[in-house]
Amino acid sequence: MRRKRTTDWPLLWSAVKDNAGPFFMLLIMGLIFGFAGGGVFFLGFGEAGAMVFGGFFALIGLALFVYAFVSAHSGIGYYYGLALLRKYGMDVDGVLTRKDADCQLHQVLDNNNRVNGEYYSCNLLVEFDYQFNGRNHSGAYYLNKADLFDKLREGDRLPLKVLRLDPSVHKVRERRLSNMLKGREPEQPSRIPSGAEITQLA
């Protein structure tokens, strides 16, 4: 019988505290923009310029207010999942089935909208299969390190940390993987542009 997943309140509270700073900063900014824009809109009601200006600022405030809650929910869920894995996770071996480097070119513009520089940002996705409690599962994870990504080959063993009560919550043990791949030459040519920033997605 499947055990019911329960909430670890101390870990959840810790994740909430870790995200409290950014949440309240966005919330306060949203309220400031919202009240300031709303005040200008109503005080200047009937004047097109004031109404447009006030309405624009009020919309910015509303967007920041909503984004504060959306980002807090996402951040709390991510860090709570990591905390659960550290406390209740089990070590499992998976098999790499696919890897993909999603790289985007970004241009830096000067005050005259001329290109002043450019850089790449990459999301390094690995997909894998693994078994847990006699059942087959599939998962995906975004790596933090370009050198690990370049050394990986399809069919390689991946060390994972899997949550006991919910095997859909998992992560790649990157330190262990780095030790396993010591001495292996990276893939050539690399799929990652030189100097690219590696972004971590939740």
Image (cartoon, helix red, strand yellow):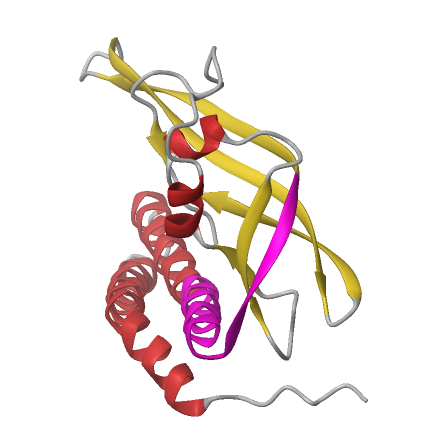
How would you classify the magenta stretch by its main secondary structure?
helix
Q: Is residue 78 rendered magenta in the image?
A: yes
Identity of the residue furthest to the front in this view = 183
> In which quadrant of the rendered view does residue 39 lie?
bottom left
Q: Please, which residue is most extreme toward the left here?
A: 111
Q: Position of residue 81 (x, y in %)?
A: 48, 70
Of 155 and 47, which appears nearest the observer? 155
List x then y, in percent, for residue 43: 27, 63
Q: Is residue 107 magenta?
A: no
Q: Does residue 160 appear to the left or right of 39 in the view shown?
A: right
The N terminus, quarter of image:
bottom right
Foreground residue, 168 or 129? Answer: 129
Residue lying at 42% horizontally and 72% vertically, measured from the top left: 86
Look at the picture and state if 74 lies above or below 103.
below
Region of the chain picked out in magenta, as a range: 69-96
Q: Which residue: 41% across, 64% down? A: 75
In-image side of 163 versus 95 (left or right): left
Q: Can you give x and y, in whole percent of width and height, for residue 186 in the image?
A: 43, 21
Placement of 13 over or under 60, stated as above or below: below
Q: Is residue 35 left or right of residue 96?
A: left
Number of numbered discs on residues: 0
- Residue at 49 percent of width and 44 percent of height: 142
**Where is residue 64 drawn, in percent x and y?**
37, 59
Residue 9 drawn above or below residue 38: below
